[in-house]
Structure formats: structure tokens, C-alpha cells
Image: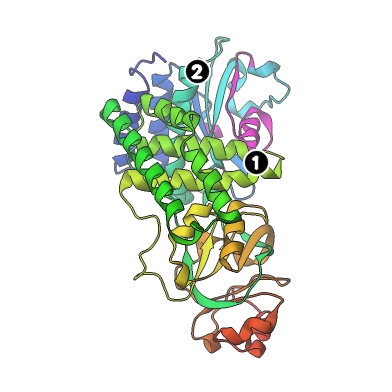
Amino acid sequence: MRGALGGPRVLLRRLREVMAEPVSAQERLDKIVVLIAANMVAEVCSVYVLRVDSTLELYATEGLNRDAVHHTVMRSDEGLVGLVASQASAVNLSNAQAHPAFAYRPETGEEIYHSFLGVPVLRAGNILGVLVVQNRARRTYSEEEVEALQTTAMVLAEMIASGELSALALPGAEPAARRSVHLKGSALSEGIALGHVVLHEPRVVVTNFIADDVQKELAHLNSAVESLRTSLDEMLEHGDVVEGGEHRDVLEAYRMFAYDRGWVHKLEEAVMTGLTAEAAVERVQSDTRARMLRQTDPFLRERLHDLDDLANRLMRQLTGRDHAPSRESLPENAILVARSMGPAALLDYDRKRLRGLVLEEGGPHSHVTIVARALGIPARSRTQPASPIPATQSLSTARPAIYTFGRFPTWKRPMPSACGFALVASSNMRRCATSRASPKTARKSRFCSMPG
């Protein structure tokens, strides 16, 4: 890319300055699209944000009719912008109007523009919006330009996820990044336990995207990868997997991902574009997650949790953070609640204090499920929409809750009779005698109504 402002690294620095300015969210977005358009020598740059009602709204533009901002709304699968969102991948066209997915919106005034480049705004593999540039001349954007726009979209993703744009939205039309989700699922590993909720929060939020010294970032990345590999080697030589078994085989397969040269090469390429090591890990894993979520093969989809876990472990190596809470800070009876988890992440927790596991994502054949079963940890996966269960984002560590593992839905509510603990149960109630709740209390808990 040879833009007026000098390339992607200069653009990222300018964006960082804009993000730090004490201006309104709309002013910030307006400045961002102007910067991107100038840098890419594009006549149009537009930002579309995915809303809670699964539509895409035009939030800012440089080049299109400004009156269309906050008025142009389309379905998440409508037009070229919807195509980018539904595929979670870039769309690069020299003649956009000839594409069958093209949808003309007269209020935008886009009929005079032919070339089109749209990239998804992704965070943790989830679509938050679409970033688009357009030109009148018919041209295909270069790989460097596509990569630069994808990198810029990462900055927008953090802005959307922060909730800053919610002030611009009408009730019921807020950005989808701020919505709550209600889920239910099925038992993965049966058992009964009583304990406090502990949120597994492996993701490290990247705050510095721009590398001041690329070679220094490459060295930092390679050092962290080596430390990651060493830590996995040590995990296989100690603890619950030393004696072998199916769960050790799972850890051996997981370790192979860390030694994959292709994965490391992608990370190095991302750093070479001007990103910090942490931002490179975030970008590579976000792209990987978006692709794998659209796989129909359940085996491939299950491996996504291993790759997520590996990326999170590497991120913590880069930032010097612990992989799990220390033994002292973990409740004696902990019930782990997570969006997803890899097998190594489960082994990071003190086995003597862990009583149960609740996952939003994960099936009976996932690696973390195999390890949980081998260690005798009750586990449940929440895979389908349901009304009473908030997503993990709405929970807080040590909050009183009820979790039922087995034939019944998973509930969350305070339970005074269990002293503010969380109950994890299965259809096999004979083991209730080992918990601090009686079988009678446990049965009642499964049918309690939940507060809002």
C-alpha cells in the first residue's frame, strides 16, 4: 500500500492518536474513516456495525452521503457488506455492481464507485461489524492493502467492544458486542459437587497494537513461543497426566500444535506488518476462529478450543501473566465457568479445589471433556439458546449460583440453604451425600424459578 500518509505503520500510529483524543464517539469514528481513506487513497471509507437485532448499520463514512449515517440499515446477510459479515472474510472486487450479492442503496450515493474492499471487524472470532473502502476506478486491491485494512479493523473492534458506540444507538439497536446471550446444553461428565463460581478468563486484552521496533517484537515472540513449549513439556512430565491414559494422549496432541511451524510463521508475518507480538497473536487467532466456526466438520470445530487455548497461553507468556489463579486465591470448592477451554487450561487449576466445569462451547469429544472425565470432574456444555441462562459475560466470580449437570437445564440463582455456593448435579442423585446439600435440597434446586 502506498497511501498519502505513508503506509500501515503510520496509519496505526495516527489511529492511536485519534483513539486517545478526548472527543465524542461519533467524532472519533469520523476521524478514523478520513484517516483510512487518505492512507489507502480511497474515495470512500465506511464503517458498518452489527446490531443486537442482527442488522448492519452505517455508523460513519468518508465519501458516501453523510445523511445516510445511522439511517442505512441492512440485514446481516444483505449486499456485499452482508457477504463480508456472513463469511467473516474479505471481499475484494474490481466491479462491485456486477456481483450478484450487490444491493444498491440510493441514499448512500455509492452508484459511482466500482471497486470494493470489505473486511470483517472481528474480536475473538466474533463479527462486530464491517470496514469498507471503495474507489471509482475499477481495480483489485493488493494483498498488502487487504492486510492493512484487516489490521486497522482490529483497532475498530476494540472501540466497538468497549461499549463506546452504545451512546449513539437507539434502544434495541445497540452494537451486538454488548448483548447478553442465554444458553443451555447437555451433560458431558456426570457427577455432583458444591462450590463457588469461578470465571475462567484467559483472554488478555491487547492495548498496544503498534510495534516501535519490529525486530524486538520478533525476538519477544520467539522467546515466548519457546517458553510456551517448555511449560507444556513440563506439564506432561508432572501432575495428573504422568501415568498415561487417554487424557495424556490428548495433551500430547495439544503439544504438537505449539510445535507447528506454520502457526509460528503466521505470527511472524503478522509482526512484520508492524504489529506488536501480542496484537499479532490476537489477529492470527481471530482469523483462525472465524474460519473454523464456519466448518461443518465437528472434529475440526472441536480443535478450535485447543487453538484458542494455545493462543491465550502464548498471550500470557508475552505479558507475563499467570495461566490460572493461584492456589491461595482459588476457592476450596470451585466450579469453573468458561466460554471454551483447552485441555492444558483445565490442568492449570488446582485439581484438589476444582469441583465442576460449565462450558458455553464444547462437545462430548472435545479434548477438555476427555480430560475432565479422566479426572472425575463433572462437566456440562451449553450449546443452544435458552431463556434462563446468561452468558459467562454476565457472571462474576464467587456469585451465588446453581448449576445442574445432567438431564435438567442449568440454572443460576442465589441459594441460601447452600450458604451462597453453587450446586452442580446430575441425574445420579446417589452422590449427594458427599456434598454439603442434601438430596432433597438438590432436587428442589433443579426446579427453582430464576430471578431476572
Is residue 241 positioned above or below 217 on the image?
below
Of residue 30 and residue 145, the one placed in the foreground of this image is: 145
Q: Quadrant of the C terminus?
A: bottom right
Q: Position of residue 318 (x, y in %)?
A: 33, 43
Q: What amino acid type is highlighted by mark number 1?
A: Leu
Q: Which residue is mark 2?
A: 143
Can residue 48 be seen at all in this image of the molecule?
A: no
Can residue 37 be seen at all in this image of the molecule?
A: yes
Q: Is residue 25 magenta?
A: no
Judged by depth in the image, the label closer to the viewer, 2 or 1, is: 1
In the displayed structure image, the side of residue 315 where residue 65 appears, left or right: right
At a point 58% along the width and 44% down the height, the residue shown is 304
In the displayed structure image, the side of residue 73 where residue 6 appears, left or right: left
Q: What amino acid type is highlighted by mark number 2?
A: Glu
- Rounded to the nearest angstrom, the CA distance separating label 2 from label 1 is 27 Å
Of residue 133 and residue 381, the one placed in the foreground of this image is: 381
The mark nearer the N terminus, 2 or 1, is 2
Please report the bounds of the magenta region as a residue range.
67-95
Helix, strand or loop under label 2? helix
At a point 68% along the width and 24% down the height, the residue shown is 102
Q: Position of residue 314 (x, y in %)?
A: 40, 43
At a point 48% along the width and 53% down the height, the residue shown is 344
Q: Which residue is mark 1?
A: 300
Q: Position of residue 158 (x, y in %)?
A: 43, 43
In the displayed structure image, the side of residue 295 where residue 223 appears, left or right: left
Counting labels gives 2
Q: Is residue 93 magenta?
A: yes
Helix, strand or loop under label 1? helix
